[in-house]
Image (spheres, rainbow, N blue to C red):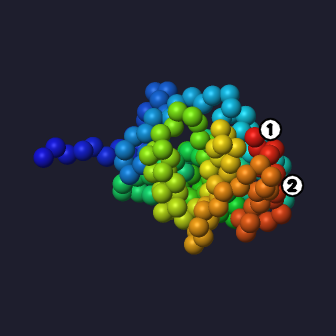
């Protein structure tokens, strides 16, 4: 029987020093590729109103493409397109490197080239880690699927309004503006 090498967060940090970017799902390297124009526009249209709301309310920090260590042994390291962490949870996180915590909000923008199995694995890992609010944005369908613990997923369309729920009280964003 052949042993399968499980990679670690430290392996990914080393590879990043060499200019290669990966995520990890249960020790398996997942290559991160460059995104296209539509992906970038949708991520930006989500990031900016979220960032402004968080800054105005001194609620925490908003990130783009920052790695979160969701699990150890085997390691899970995911870098959502947009994420948010409440201020009180950042005190012991350190200033550099991947964040050793679960984001309060994770946003994944689905590119046309992403395989369904990869997307489903990432959703499963975010949910297993207990991410309080997970948003899956599908630009081609112009939908946002909202995942919250102990609730069935719900899909929002262009005429709906996304809200921050208990994670970001007072935050709202018309879905139409995400895909404008």
162 sits to left or right of 15: right
Front in this rendered view, residue 63 or 99: 63
Q: Which residue is mark 2?
A: 56
Q: Secondary structure at mark 2?
A: helix
- Residue 149 x %, y %: 58, 69
- Residue 154 in the image: above or below residue 139: below
In this view, which residue lies farthest toward the right? 56
Q: Can residue 54 be seen?
A: no
Q: Which residue is mark 1?
A: 180
Q: Secondary structure at mark 1?
A: loop
- Residue 133 in the image: above or below residue 19: below
- Residue 30 x %, y %: 43, 39
Q: Can residue 46 be seen?
A: yes
Q: Residue at x 45, y 35 (%)?
A: 31
Q: Residue at x 48, y 57 (%)?
A: 124
Quadrant in which the C terminus is drawn: top right
Q: Residue at x 57, y 72 (%)?
A: 150
Q: Are marks 1 and 2 in contact (CB under 8 Å)?
A: no
Q: Earlier in the sequence, mark 1 or mark 2?
A: 2
Numbered circles on residues, count:
2
Q: Residues within 10 Å of mark 2 (few under 14, many from 20)?
A: few
78 sits to left or right of 132: left
Q: Residue at x 16, y 43 (%)?
A: 2
Residue 92 picture quarter: bottom right
50 sits to left or right of 1: right
- Residue 17 x %, y %: 48, 31
User: Could you tell me how far apart the alpha carbons at marks 1 and 2 are, in whole angstroms?
Assistant: 24 Å
- Residue 71 in the image: above or below residue 38: below
162 sits to left or right of 17: right
Front in this rendered view, residue 60 or 47: 47
- Residue 59 x %, y %: 77, 60
């Amino acid at each position: 029987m052949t042993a399968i090498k499980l990679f670690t967060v430290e392996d990914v940090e080393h590879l990043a020093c060499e200019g290669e970017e990966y995520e990890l799902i249960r020790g398996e390297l997942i290559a991160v590729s460059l995104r296209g124009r539509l992906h970038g526009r949708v991520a930006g249209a989500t990031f900016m109103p979220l960032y402004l709301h968080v800054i105005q309310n001194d609620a925490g920090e908003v990130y783009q493409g920052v790695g979160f260590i969701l699990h150890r042994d085997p390691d899970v390291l995911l870098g959502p397109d947009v994420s948010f962490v409440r201020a009180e949870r950042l005190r012991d996180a350190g200033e550099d490197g991947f964040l050793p915590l679960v984001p309060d909000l994770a946003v994944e923008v689905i590119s046309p080239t992403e395989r369904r199995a990869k997307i489903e694995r990432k959703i499963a890992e975010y949910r297993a880690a207990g991410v309080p609010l997970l948003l899956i944005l599908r630009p081609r369908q112009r939908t946002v699927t909202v995942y919250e613990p102990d609730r069935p997923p719900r899909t929002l369309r262009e005429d709906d309004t996304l809200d921050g729920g208990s994670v970001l009280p007072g935050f709202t964003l018309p879905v139409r503006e995400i895909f404008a």
